[in-house]
Amino acid sequence: MTPALGIVWYILIGVLVAGYALLDGFDLGVGILYPFIAKNDAERQTLRHSIGPVWDGNEVWLLTAGGALFAAFPAVYATVFSGFYLAMMLVLFCLIFRAVSLEWSEKAAGAKRGFRGWDLAFFLGSTVAALLLGVALGNVVRGVPVGLDGEFAGSFFDLLNPLALVIGLTGLAMIVVHGASWTAVKTDGALRARAAAVRSWAHWVFVLLVAVATICAALIVPEQAKAVVTNPVGIIAVIVLVLGIVLSRFAMMRKSDGLAFTGSAAGILGLVAIMAVGNYPALVPALGTPERSLTIANSASSHLTLLVMLIIACIGVPVVLAYTALVYKSFWGRVKTAAGDAKGGGAH
């Protein structure tokens, strides 16, 4: 029997993952676009400033999701983090270098020492982290080899399978669209125009990859695909994804940056919800041996642990949401590019 509190925590962890994809997704996207749409130091500074007040808070969602998984489903945490150890360490190093690059780029911009090196670290850290996180989610959808002891029974190269790579590329395209949408909302002039152009073609790539990923999932994991289309929540998630895609394209045609960003956000929420519904009640499907899958029922913590955590979450989450909303409201508005933009000059 699946415990009710386990279901609640399955949903809450899904919400945390969606929150991370939604919030940190756009600043990862800015990092990926950074060397391509910024043509001078002033524009690079504008891009950094567009995410400067929020990027570190956005990453807290990933830490919170990991902590919640550890406390609510410790067996899942152990299996996932042991199996994905190398990939997770690469993600960690990418996020560290990315954070350091953002802090040091401002100082190095004035001194002109190592500036391009930090730019490269920002780009690579954002790109590799986004791709690896997408591949990790792809493996959770496909399933991973699980031994009799409940531990990961494969190798790093087992994670580089076609479905996971397609889902990883789909996630990467999604983040590029989201980052370009954010940049179009937060900047103006030539920088905003370039971001809008990238957003348009990246959106078509994203739509194509969604179609490819859907076909691959129907062929490789038909049980998950069937679970989505036969579950009312799954159907709603598909509708949200489709509406998000249509809304984004409609908003681009109308040159409505805010609406395009809303559509991009809806697409992300739809994708995360589809994955959650497809896997339910498993958190980690066991590849080839469904009976070894780690589910809500066989991997949840004790009732008392889940209850105490839920009480804390009911107090803490509203505070975090209110604080996050306040930060975004305080720093809302377009970031103006410095005067050096027109001449290709440096940041001021």
Image: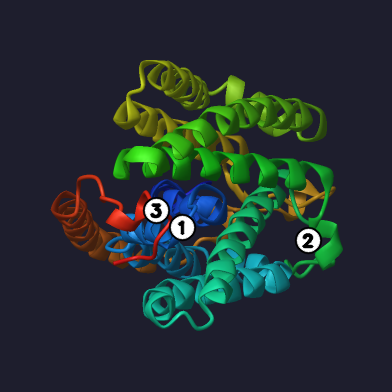
What residue lies at 53% left-to-right and 68% top-to-bottom? Answer: 119
Q: Secondary structure at mark 3?
A: loop
Amino acid type indicated by mark 2: Val
Q: Secondary structure at mark 1?
A: loop
Of marks 1 and 3, which one's residue comes earlier in the chain?
A: 1
Q: Is residue 101 left or right of residue 342?
A: right
Q: Quadrant of residue 191?
A: top left
Closer to the observer: label 1 or label 2?
A: 1
Q: Secondary structure at mark 2?
A: loop
What residue lies at 76% left-to-right and 67% top-to-bottom? Answer: 152
- Residue 265 x %, y %: 40, 36
For mark 1, what is the residue? 40
Amino acid type indicated by mark 3: Lys
Crowding around mark 1 (Cα neighbors within 10 Å: few <14, some 14 to 19, many 20+) is some
As measured in the structure, the alpha-carbon distance from the residue carrying label 1 to the one carrying label 2 is: 50 Å
The color scheme shown is rainbow
Closer to the observer: label 1 or label 3?
A: 3
Q: Is residue 231 left or right of residue 7?
A: right
- Residue 315 x %, y %: 18, 61
As measured in the structure, the alpha-carbon distance from the residue carrying label 3 to the one carrying label 2 is: 58 Å
The front one of 232 and 237 is 237
For mark 3, what is the residue? 343
Q: Is residue 276 left or right of residue 311?
A: right
Marks 1,2: beta carbons within 8 A: no
Crowding around mark 2 (Cα neighbors within 10 Å: few <14, some 14 to 19, many 20+) is many
Looking at the picture, does residue 140 appear above or below residue 180? below
For mark 2, what is the residue? 146
Amino acid type indicated by mark 1: Asn
- Residue 82 x %, y %: 69, 73
As measured in the structure, the alpha-carbon distance from the residue carrying label 1 to the one carrying label 3 is: 9 Å
